[in-house]
Image (tube, grey):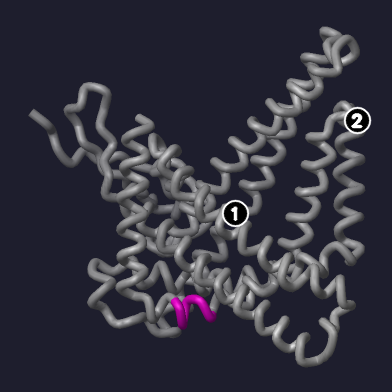
Amino acid sequence: MEDSSRTQSNIIMRRSVYTFLQNYHFFTTTAAILAFPYSLSILVSQFSVPHSPLLPAIHGHLEAIFMAAEFPPSSKLFNVLGFKISQTVSSSIFALPFTLSFFLLSKASVIHLLKRHNPTSSPPPSFSSIFPLHKPLLSTFVCNLFLLLAANSTAFSILFFGFHFINGFGFFSSSPNWITFMSAAGAVVYSIILANAIIVCNLALVSSGMEKSGGYMAILKACVLIKGRTLTALALAVPGNLVLAAIEALFHYRVVSRVYRYGGGGGGDFNGFWMGLEGVLIAYLYSILLVFDGVVSSMFFKSCKTGCLVDQEGRCCYQIEIVADKDGNGYVKLKNIEEFP
């Protein structure tokens, strides 16, 4: 299973690189420029959010929740987790207007190009053809927010019952090492739940653009398509997220730290100009990688859509469909399309 997932992820990555290079001009101009304001807002939030009253307010509420849940106060997991969640939520709120507009339009441009049968020979999409995809993407994005909220709530509930179950045997008071062990186990559980939720959200966005049907039905279809392909999705998502995190660290090192060091002047207007230009180039690189991540997600969706679900005896092949009834309610249907001898 692991070798098969690695092979599939390598094939999808090679196809994504080939498609990106074949449409290099469109992806690095139209799509990247559309994603640029969102990228810049994410990077700028690194030195604007820590000085805003939003971060300590969110962090204080999370600490109050952890204390009310009677989590061990000496656990470093909840100290680090609370700060990182507060930082992520604050940055997301800061960049929310750019996410709902420029990021979704950039995602729509990538999906609209790749939904064609032969994107390498087709002309690039126009803005008039991109804007109709914004509505289903927006509705799916709103549903994704509730899914991520539910995933975090589920993870904290599991950690709550796990810590209290172990604490009922008196392990925390008898051995401080149990706190470290449970913190490490809790970090693994939280990472697994959140990673699966993020993968479903990304696939749901692509599905809503490809099928032009957003909302909860796109999430439902993503959950069906991802079945049996979780390892492949993780192998595709982890490298991209690591590269994006590296670019954020580069922006912090080259721009944010220098702003703090020189008080925003950089030793003069000339140095400040070049420092700002360097920040713009880093944000543009961040945009290109966001576009490439959209290409990878789209190619993964195509792989899931063309793939088939075979039963345990290997005789029946099914096609995934979403059917709507007369009232407009949709449901997932597995259609038998072939019988194997």
Q: Is residue 105 magenta?
A: no
Q: Which residue is mark 1?
A: 143
Q: Name which residue lies at 55% across and 58% down.
A: 243
Q: Where does the image place residue 108, in percent across and percent down from the top left?
A: 46, 70
Examine the rendered structure and indicate whether residue 249 appears above or below residue 59.
below
Examine the rendered structure and indicate whether residue 340 appears above or below residue 280.
above
Q: Name which residue lies at 42% across and 42% down.
A: 226
Q: Where does the image place residue 330, in percent across and percent down from the top left?
A: 43, 49
Q: Residue furthest front?
A: 267
Q: Quadrant of residue 253?
A: bottom right
Q: Name which residue lies at 51% across and 76% down.
A: 32
Q: Which residue is mark 2?
A: 73
Instruction: Work out which quarter of the rendered image holds the C terminus and state it.
Output: top left
Residue 34's disc is none
Q: Is residue 29 magenta?
A: yes
**Which residues are drawn in magenta?**
28-33
Q: Residue furthest left?
A: 341
Categorize mark 1 by other alpha carbons within 10 Å: few (<14), some (14-19), many (20+): many
Q: Mark 1 or mark 2: name the one nearer the start of the chain.
A: 2
